[in-house]
């Protein structure tokens, strides 16, 4: 989420195939590279909200194993793929994903610097 702060613009084309992670144990921000940025003009049109929504889609895909089916399936309800994350860990991840995929919530908590979970 710090990409917009370091590049001073949204990524604009965030998807799982544009995230490269190096390292084999504990991953740090230095181990993550975002590739295939949208043109600056296109990224500005899409805005930070689109990049955050895309991050929610990526989290959903990592946990559930399939792409987020769309707004007709929001909010995401607790289910077995999420609870596999662990007794205390699944709820914050589900909350974060729901906030990122929400048609309205992500902008509100991002602007206040507060993150769910």
Image: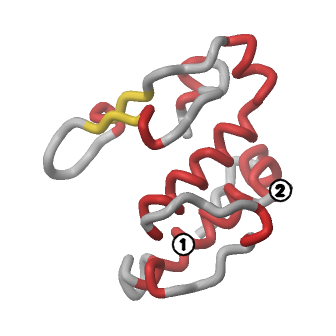
- Crowd around label 2: few <14 · some 14–19 · many ≥20 (10 Å): few
Q: In terms of image quadrants, where is residue 68?
A: bottom right
Q: In terms of image quadrants, where is residue 35?
A: top left
Q: Number of numbered discs present?
A: 2
Local SS, label 2: loop
**Residue 78 on image: x %, y %:** 58, 85
Local SS, label 1: helix
Residue at which label 1 appears: 92
**Tag nearer the camera, 2 or 1:** 2
Task: Return the mark for residue 68.
Answer: none
**Residue 98 on image: x %, y %:** 67, 66
Q: Is residue 27 above or below residue 115?
A: above
Q: How far is the residue under mark 2 from the one under mark 1?
A: 19 Å
Q: Is residue 84 above or below residue 48?
A: below
Residue at which label 2 appears: 103
Please tell me which of labels 2 and 1 falls first in the chain. 1
Cβ atoms at labels 2 and 1 below 8 Å apart: no
Image side of residue 102 versus residue 88, left or right: right
Q: Residue at x 53, y 62 (%)?
A: 60
Image side of residue 43 versus residue 63, left or right: right
Image side of residue 47 versus residue 14, left or right: right
Quadrant location of the N terminus? top right
Q: Residue at x 64, y 18 (%)?
A: 8
Q: Residue at x 55, y 58 (%)?
A: 67
Q: Is residue 53 above or below residue 6?
A: below
**Residue 12 on image: x %, y %:** 65, 27
Quadrant location of the C terminus? bottom right
């Amino acid at each position: 989420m710090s990409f917009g702060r370091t590049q001073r613009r949204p990524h604009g084309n965030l998807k799982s195939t544009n995230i490269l992670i190096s390292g084999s144990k504990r991953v740090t921000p230095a181990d993550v590279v975002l590739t295939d940025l949208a043109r600056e003009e296109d990224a500005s049109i899409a805005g930070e909200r689109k990049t955050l929504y895309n991050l929610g889609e990526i989290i959903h895909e990592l946990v559930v194993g399939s792409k987020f089916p769309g707004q007709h399936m929001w909010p995401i309800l607790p289910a077995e793929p999420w609870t596999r994350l662990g007794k205390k860990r699944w709820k914050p991840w589900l909350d974060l994903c729901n906030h990122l995929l929400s048609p309205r919530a992500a902008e509100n908590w991002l602007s206040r610097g507060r993150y769910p979970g």
